[in-house]
Image (tube, rainbow, N blue to C red):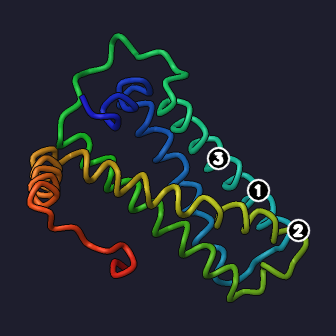
Amino acid sequence: MSTAATVIGNLGTYTLSAQVYDALALASRLAAGVKNRGSALRMAYHLRRLDARVSEFVDIVNRAMAGNMKPDPTAEPVTPVMLRSHADNFENLYRTLDYIVAGARRAGLTNNSLTAGSIRGIERHLDAIANLADWFDLASQPDAINRIFQGAEQERERGELIDLAKVE
């Protein structure tokens, strides 16, 4: 079983989905309001909630990855379709959060002391969310991963080494 499947098993499929959808719903509501800047105080409250929710979500996934959570014995078996579905959810969350950060910048909310910290907090989690999307996407394709590693092993055995300085 892949590490991604283990994480889903530890969190439970529906728990993980609920966490992602909860963060996505909050982000979507905020994305609609970030365009017109609205009330800075209301925006600061929602940005702070979103930052806390995303931070909590990333922390839960990290704990599950580290094996600090007990597996859910009632969790259904993890399938490649399930992994792909989670990858899509993470990609959607990433795009929405990125839109919020960019919109907040355009609206001048990064220069406001009430909102700047939360926006930077959300921005810090963007890479983690994008990496989760990529990780779950790759985990949903075990055959492709095995082919990549087998090809790399064969190249190494033939002495076809590539200088890392030439790799972007």
Quarter of the image where one finds residue 41:
bottom right
**What residue is at 72 percent from the left and 68 percent from the top?**
119
How many angstroms separate mark 1 from mark 2 (CA)?
A: 9 Å
**Contact? badges 3 and 2 (CB < 8 Å):** no
Residue matched to label 3: 53
Disc 1 packing (10 Å; few <14; some 14–19; many ≥20): many
Residue 143 vs residue 84, the one in the foreground: 143
Disc 2 packing (10 Å; few <14; some 14–19; many ≥20): some
Residue 27 vs residue 111, the one in the foreground: 111
- Chain-order first, disc 3 or disc 2: 3
Which quarter shows the N terminus?
Answer: top left
Disc 3 packing (10 Å; few <14; some 14–19; many ≥20): many
Q: Where is residue 82 in the image (x, y as percent from the top left)?
A: 24, 40
**What residue is at 80 percent from the left and 58 percent from the top?**
45
- Chain-order first, disc 1 or disc 2: 1
Left or right, 13 with reference to 60: left
SS at badge 2: loop
Residue matched to label 2: 114
Which quarter shows the C terminus?
Answer: bottom left
Left or right, 108 with reference to 168: right
Q: Is residue 74 above or below residue 125?
A: above
Residue 121 vs residue 20, the one in the foreground: 121
Q: Is residue 89 above or below residue 44?
A: above
**What residue is at 66 percent from the left and 76 percent from the top?**
34
Residue matched to label 1: 48
How many angstroms separate mark 3 from mark 2 (CA)?
A: 18 Å
Q: In this view, does 77 lie above or below 18?
A: above
Amino acid at dot 3: Arg
Left or right, 82 with reference to 104: left
How many angstroms separate mark 3 from mark 1 (CA)?
A: 9 Å
Amino acid at dot 1: Arg
Q: Position of residue 131 (x, y in %)?
A: 43, 57
